[in-house]
Amino acid sequence: MRRALLLALSLLAIPAVQAAELKPFQASYTADWKQLPMSGSAERSLSKDANNVWTLSFKATMLIASLTESSTFAFKNDSLIPQSYTFERGGLGKAKKVNLDFDWATNMVTGTDRGDPVKVPLLSGTLDKSTYQLALQRDVAAGKKSMSYKVVEGTDVDTYDFRVLGSEKVQTKAGTIDAIKVERVRDPTQNKRTTIMWFAKDWDYLLVALQQVETDGKQYNIMLQDGTVDGKAVKGN
């Protein structure tokens, strides 16, 4: 009986699920807009500074267009806690600029979106339009089949829903990557935009490819060219 009790106590001391640590990464992609006779490049990275502040960055450039996006956040108790978010797009279509500050002391998100002031109540679990992508990556790695996130969108908070479609092999310049295919779930009667993403099974579920088709039919794609995860070069089969 005593041995059984000690065993039970020892099992209780072990977490049921060990929280996965964040791993820095860097990835380069080819990028193209199907309606334009030219291609570009994109870069995505995750890094941590000496103060344990993480930065998730994305940048895409073409001859006539550019897009940059960056988030800073803390990582505590297996949760992503946004601190700031910036976005800027120029050269193609309407220019857009967003700057947000996540103040957890006052529980408010403040900033500007296309020049309009933003002041949104900040609830636990709220993410920005960059950190939700990392949360999605981690949830896919954890084996979840459907996911939902509260994301600051414009001057409000929206719900982003996703579902796993299955496994697929993706041909990249780094080789053939075993990936999980994920779809953004939208109400087709409200929004006809489609977004599909592929995450690498063997590389901490790094984003391999993304395809987005806008409501007007314009299509945007990125495809992995090369990258590193925790300092190791990504290689396919």
Image: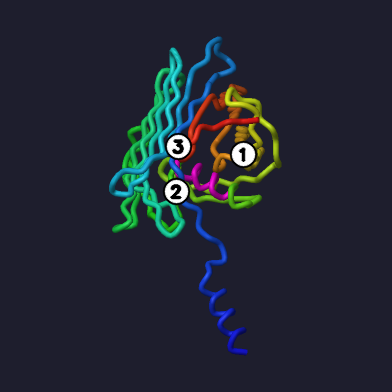
Segment colored magenta:
130-139
Whichever of callouts 2 and 3 sits on the residue coming sooner in the sequence is: 2
Res 58 quadrant in image: top left
**Image disc number at residue 190:** 1
The residue carrying pointer 3 sits among few (fewer than 14), some (14 to 19) or many (20 or more) residues within 10 Å by Cα, namely few
User: Which residue position holds label 2?
Assistant: 127
User: Which residue position holds label 3?
Assistant: 231
The answer to whether 164 appears left or right of 29 in the picture is right
Q: CA distance from mark 1 to mark 2?
A: 23 Å
- Residue 210 % position (x, y): 58, 31
- Which numbered disc, 3 or 1, marks the residue closer to the eye? 3
Residue type marked 3? Gly
Residue type marked 2? Leu
Callout 1: helix, strand or loop? loop
Prevailing secondary structure of the magenta residues: helix
- Residue 177 % position (x, y): 64, 32
Question: What residue is drawn where x is 70% and y is 35%?
Answer: 168
Callout 3: helix, strand or loop? loop
Q: Quadrant of the N terminus?
A: bottom right
- Residue 81 % position (x, y): 40, 52
Could you say which is closer to the camera, residue 24 or residue 108? Answer: 24
Whichever of callouts 3 and 1 sits on the residue coming sooner in the sequence is: 1
Could you say which is closer to the camera, residue 115 or residue 66? Answer: 66
The residue carrying pointer 1 sits among few (fewer than 14), some (14 to 19) or many (20 or more) residues within 10 Å by Cα, namely few
- Which numbered disc, 1 or 2, marks the residue closer to the eye? 2
Q: CA distance from mark 2 to mark 3?
A: 27 Å
Question: What residue is drawn where x is 48% and y is 33%?
Answer: 228
Tell which residue pokes out farthest to the top in this image.
37
Residue 122 falls within the magenta-colored stretch: no
